[in-house]
Amino acid sequence: MQAQAAPEISAQKIDYATAVSSNSWLEINLTQFQKNIDDVKAKVQSDTKICAIMKADAYGNGIAGLMPTILENDIPCIGVTSNSELFVVREKGFTGALARVRSAPVAEIEKTIGLDVEELVGDIDHARQLGELGKKYDKNIKVHLALNHGGMSRNGTDSIEEAVQIAQVPGIEVVGIMTHFPSYDRQDVLTKAKAFEKDALAIIKQARLKREEVTIHAGNSFVTLNVPEAHFDMVRPGGVLYGDQPTNPEFLPIFSFKTKIASLMDFPKDATVGYDSTVKLTRDSVLANLPVGYSDSYPRKMGNNADVLINGKRAKVKGVISMNTTMIDVTDIEGVKAGDEVVLFGVQKQDAILGSEWEKHADVILPEIYTQWGQTNDKVYVN
């Protein structure tokens, strides 16, 4: 089976009026994004670099729309994954270090050879392929050498000997040594980080690299906020920038998922709702038709489970979610009318529907769903 390419992302932003005239949209709060950046900066020393992880089109929030804020903050490094993301970052004027934070086949890497991308490598065969690519273009391919000390068993090598061999491959230049921790256990991270630092320094010495030219880094969002001993030369905050870090709920989401009421319908007691007639109304009811469904990444599992917010009040989803339509019960909410804004995820007045509810009702981890929102809905940026 041939691997699917990452979806193309747009370098263009749309205005508010255009977004809210769509059937559903993401609303991105740039003020909250800036606050999250400020709060991350406050967690690290001034000589510790920050690499803002913006993979999956900035976790669904749109690289293009967030790049002005990144540039204003003089963030020295950006981490992404797909070629389309790499191109957008450079097109938006970023001249700092640009790292691909996953392994990539040589054919994919070759397409961005002119963007000065720092690639990820953790095995000798891949390193040799990159070395040959470097020779072909008469340049050294910058790489971050991945070690498996975190225990992900994904990109990194477990062998110091292999790591030294990788560092000595002609045609590549080691600019970083990294690992990644899968755990939210501070003590586990500390133990593994100590071994990682020791071996990283040993590799630098054995491969005759210059310590000042190699960035040692291991800090994901959890480590950035909670394990300063493992910050090393650079940290890589990702989800926390967008307000998704379960261990640190003080970092608020920058995104809301919204739609509008298309129409209001009166139905009698005992009417059934939706495919498979999974619910029967227990009273005469007013149902609001929402023009959003599973094709917009509002999952079928939300049917008969989830709430939404209208006029600051909760309304229950009734029936199975259709491809393009969701029905909600607004019988007890006064003043509801067609065109009213509906919050599917986010805050409205004094109430909020946030990650824990979504994860419970949709049976997903939150990043699995909000990265899809960004692919299937317009985005608008507000302050």
Image (cartoon, helix red, strand yellow):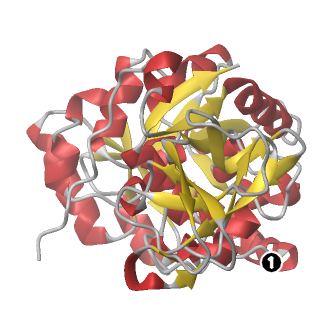
Q: Is residue 146 above or below residue 160?
A: above
The residue lying toward the viewer, choosing from 252 and 267, is 267
Q: Which residue is mark 1?
A: 191
Q: Quadrant of the N terminus?
A: bottom left
* Viewer-proximal residue among 30 and 192: 30
Quadrant of residue 293 within the rendered picture: bottom left
Residue 270 is situated, as x and y percent measured from the top left of the image, at 57, 81
Residue type for callout 1: Thr
Q: How many numbered marks, from 0 up?
A: 1
Above or below residue 90? Residue 198 is below
| Tag 1 secondary structure | helix
Where does the image place residue 229, in percent across and percent down from the top left? Answer: 86, 58
Q: Residue at x 51, y 65 (%)?
A: 368
The residue positioned 55% from the left and 42% from the top of the image is: 261
- How far across and how far down the image is residue 102, in percent? 40, 58
Residue in the picture at 43% in, 70% down: 155
Quadrant of the image occupied by residue 167: bottom left
Question: Does residue 332 appear left or right of residue 13 in this picture?
Answer: right
Whether residue 149 appears in this view of the structure is no
Circle 1 residues within 10 Å: few <14, some 14–19, many ≥20: few
Q: Is residue 192 visible?
A: yes
Figure quadrant of the C terminus: top right
Horizontal and vertical percent position of residue 117: 35, 37
* 358 displayed left or right of 115: right
Left or right of 208 on screen, residue 312: right
